[in-house]
Amino acid sequence: MDFAFSEEQEELRQTVRRFLEDKSPSSEVRRLMETTEGYDEGVWKQMAQELGLQSLHLPEAHGGQGFTFVELGIVLEEMGRVLLCAPYFSTVVLAADAIMNAGTDEEQAALLPGIASGETIAALAFTEPNGRWDAAGITMEATKQGDNYVLDGTKMFVIDGHTANLIVVVARTPGTTGEDGISFFTVEGDARGLTRTPLATMDQTRKQAKLEFSGVEAKPLGAPGEGWAALSKTLDQAAVGLSNEMVGGAQRVLDMSVEYAKVRVQFGRPIGSFQAIKHKCADMLLEVESAKSAAYYAAWAAAEDNDELPVVASLAKAYCSDAYFHAAAENIQIHGGIGFTWEHDAHLYFKRAKSSEILLGDATYHRELLAQRIGI
Amino acid sequence: MDFRDSGDEAAFRDEVRAWLAEHLTAEFAGIGGRGGPADEDAWDVRLEWERLLGKDRWLGMAWPEEYGGRNASIVEQVIFNEEYAKANAPARVSFFGEGLFAPTLIAYGTEEQKRRFLPKIQSVDELWCQGSSEPNAGSDLSNVQTRGVLDGDQWVVNGQKVWTTLAHRAHWCFAVVRTDPDAAAHRGISYLLVPMDQPGVTVRPLRQMTGTAEFNEVFFDDARTERENVLGDVNDGWKVAMATLGFERGTAFLSQQLGFQRELTDVIEVARRHGATDDGVTRQRLADAWIGVQIMKYNGLRMLSRLVRHGVIGPEASIGKLYWSTWHRRLGELAMDVLGPDSQILEGAAGDPYALDELQRIFMFSRSETIYAGASEIQKNILGERVLGLPREPR
Ligand SMILES: Cc1cc2nc3c(=O)[nH]c(=O)nc-3n(C[C@H](O)[C@H](O)[C@H](O)COP(=O)(O)OP(=O)(O)OC[C@H]3O[C@@H](n4cnc5c(N)ncnc54)[C@H](O)[C@@H]3O)c2cc1C
């Protein structure tokens, strides 16, 4: 029984932290968030070539390094800490996991090496304008034409959908409902009949796009009509990944609050000596530490790929969403007027906390899902 | 990171299971889940059970072998407590002796003191109570006014303790006493061990909001104890008292999570029977409680790993105390809401003594848990000042 990171894992964290502090300071985040692409190609390449981050948890047979979700969680936490602007979550967590869960060995061999090397930017086109995160939300139909499939319909809120050159699409067989008839497909980013529109996002550090499909030819990924189990697992893994990312941001806003509370003087004393502020920080600490416990445990369950995964994924997503948003909001309050300015970073975390809370389903959604999963 | 038992751990778990399966029978099996470390429900049966635990050295398992212990590692203690909770074995009665006093004694006691007191704790011949709080010294323990003065070979103790849990059952009291009134608040304090059965000690029960009276006022009027019955150096008892508080907030509670899990399972079951699981808001609250109790486990495991690696928990223990007490309070409230009007009716007939059922007890007793072992506000001060390094409030 051991709930601590190994020395190698701690080293990985340090390496990634140093890299990101260098490559993704606030000034870079602010530069990139104003661009439509939302990432720096040079940094993306370095992430792949120098640190091997894109290949981390991919199988060795397909150009990966064969690490687990625990290591992936560490990397995501560090990225969340600095609000890294890059299509990492979309490519390595959402799309790559979907490919690993749904794809045959041959399909994986064709798709994963490009992700591992950093050449491929991938997205998972799953949600639609109805904004649902469950099977019922998938209405886009895939019609069989000869050996191929044709997609028609609209995907919304697709993370990095406008910059991806590989798009993994979830659609359903005409006439099916619910969890039946769900299939995965792949299309190229510049496929004929695909119109991609970047969306103006409240959280500018994470880009979203609308993808309109009109008679787009698509290759099946895995067995058509039998994709729900793979999708459900992908969403659980993504919830775990996102929880780890959120924990990084939550710790960072707690640090900001504590630093400020020590130096800001009012009424002749540092504001951190007032209990109203001190106890806010203590509450944040409790929640951030608890969020870490949940996120790390969930990462372990994902690494083990055990039966606990669906339950702990919803558990972690629900708890970390609330904890991050609460901490990010308190951070603004503790900073007073400065916390409300564009210039201060507090709002960047506040906005990321909100977008992360909603992404993959908010805390209320996941508590209900959890209730069902534990048989209530 | 690995949450499975190692080979040795699994073997130890089997040993514990086998012991419990063999001994937890007849009347012992019937009282599981009743009472807690600080109440008297089914007292006599629990006392007898505790003796069995002592006889086979489960009571005192953490102590060095030379004092009758098993030298059990922290992980083994957790495994024992997990299996103990899973088996729904009786609530322990020697919390103050085994949980608080013994580890303090092992850390600060002399060889003679350890040989004198540990065996009697293990045989359950001597129960202990904690004499810290006074009418004017609660959260601010350094304000204790009870006086201890040396008179030849004995200490003479005068003053009053309050909220002293199970003092009426205890044979000994570990008391925080002022022995140098001229020294600064934290300096002139000694940690005295005072026998309870003597003319100078009067114990008066205090009735709690639960209707029962597990805590007491304790009056010392020229109470006496032998000169050697001081733990640590004379006038250096503050750090000994702090060590006890550390055990109270940290390790003593590491393993109660499974008991909480069981309570929540009961609440879910009751919710089902009352049709409350169809209600969206209740579903949210039940799920939230479930998330809370799981995170309590993960937090505990992380703390445990830190303890194994670094030997101490440190002020982070306050996270655990704050977390479980707040969670438990909310569970009690949820239980009452799930029961609806039924929650307001007691078990007995009108005119019977005031008696609560299990869920009502959780609802009531949990109000004390955010007060004792360091009130929540104090825990937040500790977290703010000693973990986060925020400036202290003016004192
Ligand atoms: C069921 C139960 C069993 C107990 N058993 C024992 C026992 O066996 N032995 C023993 O010695 N004691 C025991 N206690 C006493 C317990 O340790 C004290 O109640 C506790 O330390 C609080 O002290 P107090 O009651 O004097 O409250 P106070 O210290 O007066 O506190 C009152 C309120 O003021 C708040 N407060 C105090 N100081 C501050 C501050 N600096 N900043 C912000 N808020 C503050 C507190 O958090 C609390 O909300 C028990 C208590 C209970 C309820």
Image: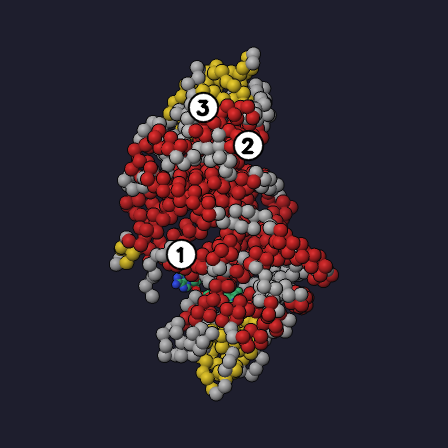
- Residue closest to the eye, A33 or B304: B304
Whether the residues at callouts 2 and 1 have beta carbons within 8 Å, the answer is no
Question: Which residue is found at the position 50% from the left and 86% from the top?
Answer: B153
Label 1: which residue?
B387
Whether labels 2 and 3 share one chain: yes
Label 2: which residue?
A232
Q: Position of residue A190 (x, y in %)?
A: 41, 18
Circle 3 marks a residue in which chain?
A
Crowdedness of circle 1 by 10 Å Cα count: few (<14), some, many (20+)?
some
Q: What separation in Å lies between label 1 and label 3 (alpha carbons)?
A: 46 Å
Rendering quarter of residue A135: top right
Q: In the picture shown, does residue B42 fall above or below A280?
A: below
- Residue closest to the eye, B46 or B68: B68
Crowdedness of circle 2 by 10 Å Cα count: few (<14), some, many (20+)?
some
Question: Which residue is found at the position 41% from the left and 26% from the top?
Answer: A119
Label 3: which residue?
A166
**Three-letter amino acid code at the position of disc 3:** Leu
- Residue closest to the eye, B345 or B75: B75
Q: Of tags 1 and 3, which is closer to the observer?
A: 3
Crowdedness of circle 3 by 10 Å Cα count: few (<14), some, many (20+)?
many
**Three-letter amino acid code at the position of disc 1:** Val
Q: Position of residue A70 (x, y in %)?
A: 49, 41
Secondary structure under badge 2? Answer: helix
Check residue B314 in the rendering and tell me which mark sits there, or answer none: none
